[in-house]
Image (cartoon, rainbow, N blue to C red):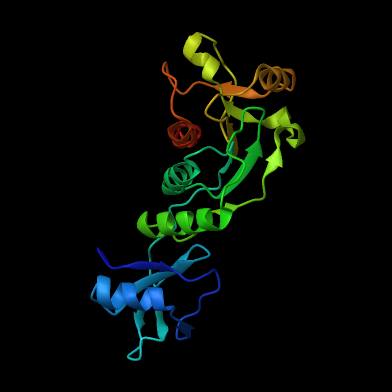
């Protein structure tokens, strides 16, 4: 199956059916990749498929044995200027859901979320996933339940120690380019949220998100 194009077609896939192929898909297979064969995926499953002779349909074949490498982690993050890079990298490491969080220092308030959905679809296609992560509607930091939150704590780069337990964690919070505000740190500490170190250096927000997910996966 190596080097065969992979296309996300939604979560409801059944062998033997014909799914309408968009012009972009038909062009990509026939003109760019110069093939009629592909793999289609969604909902955690992957199937063999081929483009019909009239270029209008994808004919679904048998289900493959490829397991979905995605995980069940929810990444809560402050939108940033390079949100597309953050979503791309986090999708590649298997994140199941994205929860945008508006923090005190969030400056990126006009994200094109429809474009972001396309970013995560492309990242899922390229990273051999069988599922596409869900992007939830943005919420305010003040509306988060902080009592069970694990968060990337940049204070650890300046010597703050943490011995909290992150085993079985299923969600993690990362801040914006400027980090969490003093008020937000105070709220996180007061709620008993678990701050974890991402190393001795201050990372770009998009890289911090990917590393934070990798860290709680162990």
Query: Is 117 positioned to the left or the right of 33 in the image?
Result: right
Q: Quadrant of the N terminus?
A: bottom left
- In percent of the image, x 62 and y 28: which residue is there? 105
Q: Can see residue 180?
A: yes
Rendered view: 4 above or below 187: below
Q: In the rendering, at what x and y percent does residue 55 appear?
A: 36, 86
**157 and 109: which one is in front?**
109
Rendered view: 213 above or below 178: below
Total labels: the figure holds 0
Residue 62 picture quarter: bottom left
**134 and 79: which one is in front?**
79
Q: Quadrant of the C terminus?
A: top left
Rendered view: 90 above or below 10: above
Query: Is 217 positioned to the left or the right of 65 in the image?
Result: right
- In percent of the image, x 46 and y 59: which residue is there? 121
| Most distant residue in the top direction | 159
Q: In the rendering, at what x and y percent does residue 134 appear?
A: 58, 54
- In percent of the image, x 73 and y 28: which residue is there? 147
Q: In the rendering, at what x and y percent does residue 24 appear?
A: 39, 73
**45 and 42: which one is in front?**
42
Q: In the rendering, at what x and y percent does residue 163 appear?
A: 57, 16
Query: Is 28 positioned to the left or the right of 98 in the image?
Result: left
- In percent of the image, x 29 and y 80: which residue is there? 36
Q: Can see residue 48?
A: no
């Amino acid at each position: 199956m190596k080097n065969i194009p992979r296309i996300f077609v939604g979560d409801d896939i059944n062998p033997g059916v014909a799914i309408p192929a968009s012009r972009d898909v038909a062009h990509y297979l026939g003109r760019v990749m110069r093939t009629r064969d592909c793999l289609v995926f969604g909902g955690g499953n992957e199937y063999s498929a081929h483009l019909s002779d009239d270029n209008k349909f994808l004919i679904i074949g048998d289900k493959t044995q490829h397991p979905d490498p995605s995980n069940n982690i929810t990444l809560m993050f402050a939108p940033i200027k390079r949100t597309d890079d953050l979503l791309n990298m986090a999708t590649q490491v298997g994140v199941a859901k994205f929860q945008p969080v508006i923090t005190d220092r969030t400056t990126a308030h006009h994200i094109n979320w429809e474009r972001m959905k396309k970013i995560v679809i492309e990242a899922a296609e390229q990273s051999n996933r069988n599922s596409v992560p869900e992007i939830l509607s943005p919420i305010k930091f003040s509306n988060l339940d902080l009592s069970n939150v694990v968060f990337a704590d940049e204070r650890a780069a300046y010597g703050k120690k943490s011995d909290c337990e992150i085993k079985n964690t299923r969600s993690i919070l990362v801040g914006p380019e400027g980090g969490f505000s003093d008020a937000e740190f105070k709220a996180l500490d007061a709620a008993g949220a678990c701050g974890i170190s991402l190393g001795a250096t201050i990372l770009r927000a998009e890289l911090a998100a990917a590393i934070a997910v990798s860290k709680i996966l162990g």
